[in-house]
Amino acid sequence: MSGSIQELEQTLARELGRVVIGTQAAVHALAIALIARGHVLVQGVPGLGKTLLAKALARALGGEFQRIQGTADLMPSDIIGVHVYDESRRSFVFRPGPLFADVVLVDEINRAGPKTQSALLEAMEERQVSVERTMSPLPEDFLVIATQNPREFEGTYPLPESQLDRFMLRIDMDYPAREAEADILGRYGGVQSAAQAALGTVTRLAPELLSQARAAVEAIHVAPALSAYVLDLARASRSHARLTLGLSTRGALALLKAARIAAGMRGGEFVTPDDVKAVAVNVMGHRLLLTPEAALEGVTDLDVVTSLLAETPVPR
């Protein structure tokens, strides 16, 4: 039943592994988001291969890739598009911006101003954009991968809660292991651009594989007790002493969807509490807003997620 889900993850890991090294956890999370039609926030210091990972994913999907660099002067029209006057038609025509791609990488999203960040809200939630009272649909497999550096705050605008809640998963990328980093130096340490050449080796996924994986997820059983467990986690986060904002209903749905896909990736036919725990950090962490006191004490959102998982009773 879940064979197509496993095949999709294995194929994606193999193809992306031709280009990126030591990012197995990130590829696993990307596969979950891809099946669930969710968007991904990648958090990590510069130089870890986030752009290369997004390019490789777009090539594996056979779709168009566009990169948007977040800057303070970036305007909504720069990403959505503008109307320009066409002399031959004697009328204004819409020229789509980079947002109309299959995979859109928004690099350093927190450097864009609030107005520009808000332009992404409709696109990420409804997969369409409204320009001059006209709604234009985005590609069917539209996927936003946004990056931000958690250690640099000068000249940045914190993402609002409504924006963060639209990212299904957050991937925290750290420096690769020594063996993986040695492999990277050996493969890409030459003068020539080996990374671009490696992208050419990525093979497109079979078009029907993704649709089969999505259909297989629907067949994975979710017991009422498991749904209640997800709801208990959400409600516990809303009353947690170290949080001013807990998990939303959208977040609870994302947690349940991700757990179903994770169950399929391990070959299961039903969701277990361990499946929920396996994806909870990626789904919940960025949606939780710490109290000022907790932040001053050095408590992180991951610490709170861990405590919620430890304190919430697990269904038998």
Image (tube, grey):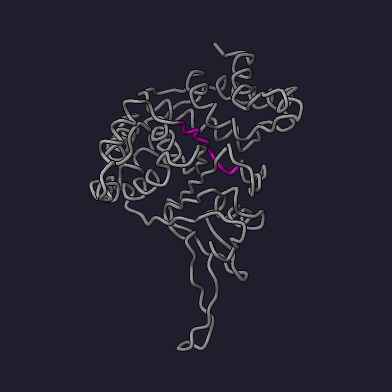
Q: Would you identify the image quadrant in which residue 22 lies?
A: top left
Task: Please state which of residues 208 and 166 is positioned toward the viewer in this rendering.
Answer: 166
In this view of the protein, can residue 14 be seen by the observer? Answer: yes
Magenta stretch, residue numbers: 165-174
* On screen, residue 46 above or below 297: below
Q: Residue drawn at (69%, 25%), measured in percent from left and top?
A: 235
- The main secondary structure of the magenta stretch is strand
The tally of labels here is 0
Judge left or right: residue 189 versus residue 132.
left
Q: Is residue 71 magenta?
A: no
Task: Please state which of residues 272 and 237 is positioned toward the viewer in this rendering.
Answer: 237
In this view of the protein, can residue 218 be seen by the observer? Answer: no
Task: Please state which of residues 16 and 233 is positioned toward the viewer in this rendering.
Answer: 16
- Quadrant of image for the N terminus: top left
Q: Residue drawn at (54%, 58%), measured in percent from left and top?
A: 128
Q: Residue drawn at (50%, 61%), measured in percent from left and top?
A: 137
- In the image, residue 54 lies at what x, y percent? 40, 46
- In the image, residue 153 lies at what x, y percent? 63, 42
- In the image, residue 313 lies at what x, y percent? 62, 13
- Quadrant of image for the C terminus: top right
Q: Residue drawn at (34%, 34%), measured in percent from left and top?
A: 9
Q: Residue furthest front?
A: 191
Q: Residue furthest left?
A: 201
Judge left or right: residue 202 versus residue 231.
left
* On screen, residue 6 above or below 311: below
Task: Please state which of residues 123 and 70 is positioned toward the viewer in this rendering.
Answer: 70
* On screen, residue 66 above or below 303: below
Q: Would you identify the image quadrant in which residue 234 lies?
A: top right
